[in-house]
Image (cartoon, helix red, strand yellow):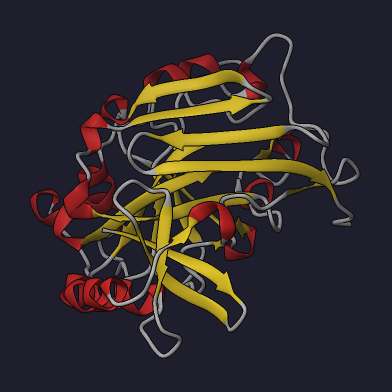
Amino acid sequence: MRLARVRTTEGPRSAVVSADQRAVHPLPGDGLTVDDVVRAGTATLAEVQAAACAVPAVPLSRIELLPPLGRFNRDILCVGWNYLDHFYESKGRREGQEPERLPGHPTFFTKGPDTVIAAHEAIAFDEQLSKRWDYEAELAVVIGRDGRSIKEEDALSHVFGFCVANDVSQRDLQRAHGGQWLKGKSIDQTMPLGPWITTRDEVEISDLTISCELNGHLVQRASAADMIFPVERIIAELSRGMTLRAGDIILTGTPSGIGNARTPPLYLRDRDVLVTRISTLGELRNPVVAAALV
């Protein structure tokens, strides 16, 4: 099943996306929100499917998608350096943050939840804040069951589903604050997420292809099977002694092709269009639009 959150004249509604991904079935206003469904786990999916079958479909082209989740437990949890080619493409370009060798454990950081925007929403861009805006296409994991010190073999049972994300980053801010990435990853209205959540039973992670286009030119493309630390390992290490909650979002890292690693560098600019795709999970298409952030 694919669960979306859409805007209607009566306010935000949950919706079930049609099998061909061309239409949605908005649920009644008194129905469960997507956040509720995620926190309830797969037990409510049959109820949601029955409610969707009782309402007519609306073409996707006639409805506004919202971020699939609207209620966050905490910051977005993220993994860095999780594709080998990406780790090595940035060698010598990390400006004092260069590790001596490939890390033996996942590198974790967070992004503030106010970064999250919808599948077609504008990425806020302010040159006064940063001169080095970069793109990072990523697979996002949505946790569906609480757990602490989760074993790798049990990790996927704690996953509700998956969606598409772009970890838009400000490289100069990322380097400027004592080696901590939070600031350069947490600018408001800069992280597209969506277009919906695809439930775990619909997804074979190793079959997913992640890609990113900038103004119609392919800049990133890789298989999720190329991750150094697979989803199961990420969840096991992140949850060791730390409770993951239903509704938490984990970004799993970006493949090679980022703008900061290119010669010359390729940074986002006002009026660019960023398209992020993951096979079977959907597409984000976000314009970059000048905004006053400072």
Q: Can you name the residue that lies furthest to the left here?
A: 153
Is 2 left or right of 65, judged from the image as shown? left
Residue 141 position in % (x across, y down): 34, 52
232 to 47, vertically: above or below? above
What residue lies at 26% left-to-right and 58% top-to-bottom? 1
Residue 30 position in % (x across, y down): 41, 90
Residue 55 shows in this picture: yes
275 to 17, vertically: above or below? above
What residue lies at 47% left-to-right and 67% top-to-bottom? 5
Residue 29 position in % (x across, y down): 45, 86
Is 45 left or right of 87, judged from the image as shown? left
Residue 135 shows in this picture: no
Is 161 left or right of 23, judged from the image as shown? left
207 to 235, vertically: above or below? above
Count the marks: how many? Answer: 0
In this view, the residue in front, 248 or 110, is 248
What residue lies at 26% left-to-right and 44% top-to-bottom? 231
